[in-house]
Amino acid sequence: MHLPENQWYPVLESGEVRNKPQAVERLGLKLVFWRSANGEPHAHIDRCPHLGAALSGGQSMGGRLVCPFHGFEFDGTGQCQHIPANGRLGKIPKGMALTGFTVREEHGLIWLWLGQHREVLPKVPFFPPLETGWRYGTVKVEWPVHYTRAIENQLDVAHLAFVHRTTIGAGGRSFVDGPYVESDAEGIKVWVSNSVDEGRHSRSQTELAAAAFGKEPSLSFLFPGVWLLNISPRMKNFIAFVPVNDQTTLYYLRVYHRIQNPLLAKPYEWLIGLSNRFILNQDRRVVVTQTPLKSADGEDRLIGADRAISQFRQIHARLLEATRPEQMPNIDERA
Ligand code: FES
Ligand SMILES: [Fe+2]
């Protein structure tokens, strides 16, 4: 998969990674995720360097990942520590090691660093307003689409009156005043106001900027794939977009709220999750029909209301350009 590199990708929810190794496809890679005895998560290419068996069929024992085929044991860094057939005193050949990735566990997600090894890595991309005092419920949804189409759909402010006519887009507010968009290499912020078409022109970016000043954006996106919809001071929707492969994208869709009592929070999360799933399904019906699979400027003719989409495309293209294949040490080992 051709992806922007030197980025933290959210790849799984924390609860999905257990001690037991499991096969997970993410970012076009066949990976094995497991936890060592201290609970630390690890990710490696799901292939034993001995004879190529899938390590996901093995076990996690005493902080080591054990291959199911000949029992080779690998530590969290991927280094082989024991080859049973060579005996306890036997030597471990150099290079008997797994291709691994740096992972972090933050905000209830597992993040994988795709890119060059660095001593000091940047922080995982997350929204400061979500950092404290919130609870959340997650819904996981898989779509047969390329991640560019999935993300652009959530930056699209002109589809609500059509795709969501019966839900959040009721009322025929088809006219998009702006939107006002700010962006940089890290992400995109969008201030939207849609209304019924009363024959006015859209305000200029300068006027919209003045109106947006001091206000939280309606929605924000951080590269490579998290999104925040500012519904109210006490409720936000969040999505982690996870590229599985070129044809598949996963959504970890969360409602963030401030209901602390779990007896009330759980049913609330369930109800909002149900409604979010329904709304997202309205999008899905259309997005799966978009061609080509990956969004492409050569094929689509954007309009002013698509400003956030065009910003996404420009920054995404720059990040892709900055990703030269030779920067990746283990490029040929990737599926
Ligand atoms: S294939 Fe893994 S130990 Fe032989
Ligand atoms: Fe939508």
Image (spheres, grey):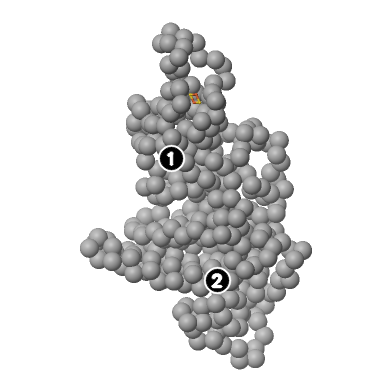
Res 172 seen here: yes
Q: Residue at x 54, y 38 (%)?
A: 121
**Along the line of sight, the residue nearer the viewer: 279 or 235:** 279
Q: Is residue 95 above or below residue 119?
A: above
Q: Residue at x 38, y 69 (%)?
A: 274
* Alpha carbon distance from label 2 to label 1: 31 Å
Q: Is residue 245 above or below residue 59?
A: below
Q: Residue at x 66, y 55 (%)?
A: 316
Instruction: Residue 147: give x, y in percent of width and height.
Output: 59, 57
Q: Report helix, strand or loop for mark 2.
A: helix
Pointer 2 residue: 285
Q: Residue at x 41, y 11 (%)?
A: 88
**The residue at label 1 has a CB less than 8 Å from ligand 1:** no
**The residue at label 2 has a CB less than 8 Å from ligand 2:** no
Res 210 seen here: no
**Along the line of sight, the residue nearer the viewer: 141 or 184:** 141
Numbered tag placed on residue 22 in the rendering: 1
User: Reading the chain from its start, which is encountered first: label 2 or label 1?
Assistant: 1
Instruction: Residue 93: give x, y in percent of width and height.
Output: 54, 15
Residue projecting furthest to the bottom: 198
Which quadrant would the C terminus be assigned to in this image? top right
Kind of residue indicated by mark 1: Gln
Q: Is residue 202 left or right of residue 33?
A: right
Residue projecting furthest to the top: 89
Kind of residue indicated by mark 2: Arg
Q: Report helix, strand or loop for mark 1.
A: strand
Q: Is residue 167 above or below residue 60?
A: below
Q: How many marks?
A: 2
Q: Is residue 312 above or below residue 22?
A: below
